[in-house]
Amino acid sequence: MPEFPQFPQPQLLNGRLYWTRSSLEKYKGQLLGKPFEPGPDFVESFVPSGQVGKEFGFGRRTLGRRVAATQSRKTDLVETEAA
């Protein structure tokens, strides 16, 4: 079974989840097998969770599962480093 790229971790701002545009573009590039190279006119911005769901074509529950998976990996890494 092929390995899928790691979904980017969100930022928590004012109680809401946001992703940086560059992290989403890198993830899309990994899915398509193309590297992300920002152009000279690229502006970094924060993308709200609703927009992320629309861009990837899945709902809030699937988005929640992806976020939970990134959080569990983060916890696993901390526990592994502590051991």
Image: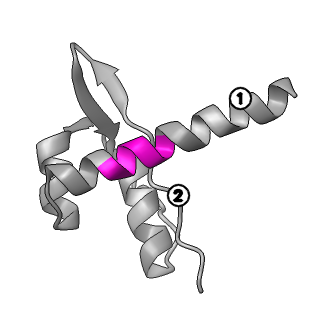
Q: Quadrant of the C terminus?
A: top right
- Give the residue number, with chain letter if any, for mark 1: 78
Q: Which residues are magenta?
A: 65-70
The disc, 2 or 1, on the residue closer to the chain's N-terminal end is 2
Q: Position of residue 8 (x, y in %)?
A: 45, 48
- Report the residue at 52% width, 57% height from top: 6
56 vs 14: above or below: below
Q: Residues within 10 Å of mark 2 (few under 14, many from 20)?
A: few
40 vs 72: above or below: below
- The disc labelled 1 sits on which kind of residue? Val
**Residue 66 painted magenta:** yes
Q: Quadrant of the N terminus?
A: bottom right
- Give the residue number, with chain letter if any, for mark 2: 6
User: On residue 53, which mark appears?
Assistant: none
- The disc labelled 2 sits on which kind of residue? Gln
Question: On the rendered structure, is 15 left or right of 59?
Answer: right
Q: Foreground: 49 or 63?
A: 63
- Report the residue at 12% width, 45% height from top: 50
**Residue 13 painted magenta:** no
- Report the residue at 44% width, 40% height from top: 9
